Amino acid sequence: MITTVGNVIEIDRRKANQADRLRVSTDYTAQRTVMEAMLNEVLATELVCVLRYRRYCFVRKPSHVDGVKPAFLHYAQVQQEQADRIAERILQLGGAPYVDPSDLAARSRSRYPGGTDLQDLVGEDLLFVRTAMENYEVMVRYFERLDLTTARVLASILAIHRQHAEELSALLIGLTPPLHG
């Protein structure tokens, strides 16, 4: 079974209901396994984001894309840099980055949209970014208890996603035709 943020939250919830809540787990190997799995989930998410942003550069309506194509290429580059940071952190913790393309999308917290309309794609992307932000917030809190360095890396990635969300919101507003009364 692949460990996900949802699994960790459920495990933490169950622990909180136990009578021995104050007992600290001494099973560092199990913690490292969970941390590595969570970071590999982040890595998968960031890599799917790279592919998604690159895809946006090739939607069918080039007249709309031409003006925003540099932004999408920039987002793809930033997401690749974040993926590289996560992969490096996994290595530093003694783990192995898992980037098998056959199940990358399944492990990602982001999805790869099938639409071709730029407005729909940006709207979906904004939803994906917000979902990723929620997951990263949970992970930051989790890692703050176990590994402050990883928590900081994730917090910096979260900040970048917040900035992307603001930019995507502004882009979506610019793509939305005005209502005519």
Image: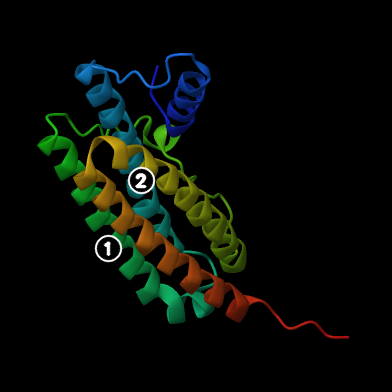
Left or right of 173 on screen, residue 15: left
Whether residue 149 is visible to the viewer of this picture, yes or no, is: yes
- Screen quadrant of the C terminus: bottom right
Q: Residue at x 36, y 37 (%)?
A: 142
**Res. 140 mark:** 2
Residue 77: horizontal and vertical position, in percent? Answer: 27, 63
Left or right of 116 on screen, residue 163: left
Circle 1 residue = 77
Left or right of 125 on screen, residue 95: left
Q: Residue at x 25, y 31 (%)?
A: 98
Left or right of 40 on screen, residue 172: right
**Amino acid beneath label 1:** Gln
**Depth check: 128 or 36 in front?**
36
- Screen quadrant of the N terminus: top left
Whether residue 57 is visible to the viewer of this picture, yes or no, is: no
Among the 4 quarters of the image, the one containing residue 37: top left
Residue 123: horizontal and vertical position, in percent? Answer: 59, 62
Residue 14: horizontal and vertical position, in percent? Answer: 50, 19
User: Helix, strand, or loop for circle 2?
Assistant: helix
* Disc 1 residue crowd, few under 14, some 14–19, many 20+, Cα 10 Å: some
**Depth check: 24 or 65 in front?**
24
Q: Residue at x 45, y 41 (%)?
A: 109
**Depth check: 91 or 141 in front?**
141
**Amino acid beneath label 2:** Val
